[in-house]
């Protein structure tokens, strides 16, 4: 599976500061998504784009992504494209909880089109992430 192989490859890239993972429209499943997400735990990462839209990932991948992002304390920009996936409230809440802990984060772009995320949850995420100097685009 692509996600597992890519995750293994990232395991040796300790000094990454910028990364774009483009898997839009692939056959990526939660198993591969979780393996990939586990390897995004990069302390030096400052700019991250993750394109998982149109895949079979969901909350399990998002939870794993949230766990990894907690350790990206230098992250300034995040673009997360999860449109047309099985992502729901539990997954996006896990990501938002992680992002709220990142002190240098200034820009977040979330694409949640055609997911299972409720409007109420999106509003809760906005409240959770709201702080001076942080721009959030949905």
Image (cartoon, rainbow, N blue to C red):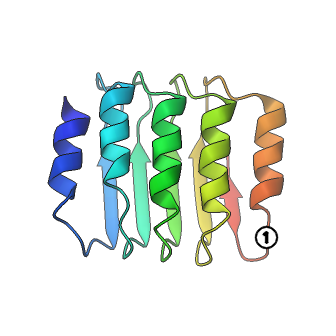
Q: Nearer the viewer, residue 18 or 101?
A: 101
Q: Is residue 133 left or right of residue 63?
A: right
Q: Nearer the viewer, residue 32 or 112?
A: 32
At a point 46% along the width and 68% down the height, the residue shown is 72
At a point 33% along the width and 73% down the height, the residue shown is 17
Q: Is residue 99 above or below residue 23?
A: below
Crowding near the residue tagged with mark 1, few <14, some 14–19, many ≥20 C-alpha atoms within 10 Å: few
Q: Is residue 73 above or below residue 41?
A: below
At a point 57% along the width and 28% down the height, the residue shown is 87
Q: x%, y% of residue 39?
A: 31, 53
Quarter of the figure with residue 119: top right
Q: x%, y% of residue 75?
A: 49, 71
Q: x%, y% of residue 127?
A: 83, 54
The N terminus, quarter of image: top left
Q: Is residue 136 left or right of residue 72?
A: right
Can you see residue 136? Answer: yes
At a point 53% along the width and 22% down the height, the residue shown is 86
Quarter of the figure with residue 6: top left
Looking at the rendered structure, the secondary structure element under dot 1 is loop
Quarter of the figure with residue 51: top left
| Tally of numbered tags | 1
Q: x%, y% of residue 16?
A: 28, 71
Q: Which residue is mark 1?
A: 131
Can you see residue 22? Answer: no
Q: Is residue 9 above or below residue 52?
A: below
């Amino acid at each position: 599976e692509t996600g597992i192989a890519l995750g293994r490859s990232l395991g040796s890239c300790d000094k990454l500061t910028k990364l774009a993972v483009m898997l839009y429209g692939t056959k990526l499943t939660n198993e591969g998504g979780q393996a990939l997400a586990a390897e995004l735990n990069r302390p030096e990462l400052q700019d991250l784009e993750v394109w998982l839209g149109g895949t079979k990932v969901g909350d399990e991948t998002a939870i794993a992504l949230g766990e990894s992002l907690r350790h990206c304390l230098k992250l300034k920009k995040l673009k997360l494209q999860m449109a047309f996936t099985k992502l729901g409230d539990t997954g996006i809440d896990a990501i938002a909880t992680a992002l709220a802990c990142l002190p240098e984060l200034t820009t977040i772009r979330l694409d949640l089109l055609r997911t299972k995320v409720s409007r109420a949850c999106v509003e809760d995420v906005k409240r959770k992430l709201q702080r001076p100097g942080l721009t959030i685009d949905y």
